[in-house]
Image: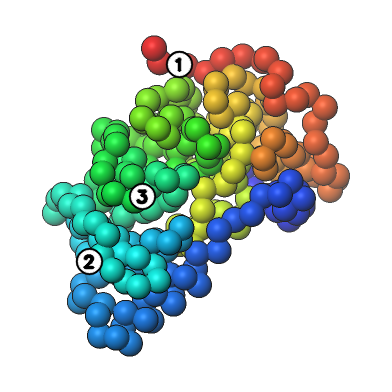
Amino acid sequence: MRRLPAVLLAAGLILGVVLPIAGFGRLAFSACLAAAGEAPKGERVVFAEAGYAITSSDHDTTLIARDLETGMRRWRMDLGGREHFASDVLIRRAGDTLLVVDNEARLRGIDLKTGKQRWDTPPASGWMLPAIASPEVVASTRCDGDRCTAEARLIADGKLRWEAPTESSPPWLGSPPIAQALQTDRALWPASAVIVPRGDRYEVRQLASGKVVARGTLAREDVGVAGNVFLRQTEKGSCRRPTSPLGARRGRAKRTS
């Protein structure tokens, strides 16, 4: 899948999609702690928004949440760990739930205010990347060895809604270039559908149900999702919203009971 056209970001803004600008808060808090001599050695800020700043240890085994304004500690959580890490810690927020990918590539749902873990997934032998979310469901790319799947889980309890085979590259599931980075100031892309690459082709699936609502060829198109809109740009440069609505029934993903 090629990089998405700039018009996709414009469409997202027209829809009222606003990405949290967390980078400034993260840097400001880091500078504040350093200036006050309060930044614990061996920690780094990995999340800063919604009134909280979270640091992790050098080996990403401990998370410490502080008040973003005062620096007062709110909670501490031990993630555990192992000698050979599968990935660095990654934190994204969905409402009052933190979606944390730990150093064993395990996705955890953690209460933002209390630090209490609500749920977790089995660790991936490769890596895990949450990419797209609605208020209720988050979609991630999970890779175990050479096998990768797109999977959607309920944010409230982590229950698996559906999964489908996909490719390891790209793992972004239809989010635009502005969201396609692992920096701490990136957010989950808000959309009601995901794009699942399968070789040189793709499927557009409803986020909530996994139903296939569109298919196409990646070699001839750039595609993306924003809010309730699926956008497609052809080789000739035209960009349009396909007439088939995202709610159209075209098939089903593998679903768990």
From the viewer's perspective, tell me whether residue 252 is left or right of residue 58: right
Check the image and name the residue furthest to the left. 83
Q: Which mark is residue 58?
A: 2
- Image coordinates of residue 80 in percent, x first then y, are 16, 49
**Is residue 56 visible in this depiction of the protein?**
no
- Whether label 3 touches label 2, CB < 8 Å: no
- Image coordinates of residue 193 in percent, x first then y, are 61, 32
Which residue in the protein does label 1 denote? 255
Q: Amino acid at mark 2?
A: Asp
| Figure check: 78 above or below 221 | below
| Residue at 43% across, 75% down | 27
- Image coordinates of residue 140 in percent, x first then y, are 45, 38
Which quarter of the rendering shows the C terminus? Answer: top left
| Figure check: 32 above or below 92 | below
Q: Amino acid at mark 3?
A: Leu
| Figure check: 255 above or below 58 | above
Query: Nearest the camera: 144 or 105?
Result: 105
Label whose residue precedes the other's in the sequence (1 or 3): 3
What is the CA distance from the residue labelled 3 to the residue labelled 2?
Answer: 21 Å
What is the CA distance from the residue labelled 1 to the residue labelled 3?
Answer: 29 Å
| Figure check: 142 above or below 70 | above
- Whether label 1 touches label 3, CB < 8 Å: no
Per the image, label 3 sits on a secondary structure element best described as loop
Per the image, label 2 sits on a secondary structure element best described as loop
Q: Which mark is residue 112?
A: 3
From the viewer's perspective, tell me whether residue 174 is left or right of residue 257: right
Q: Give the crowd class for mark 2: few <14, some 14-19, many >=20 residues within 10 Å.
A: few
Q: Amino acid at mark 1?
A: Arg
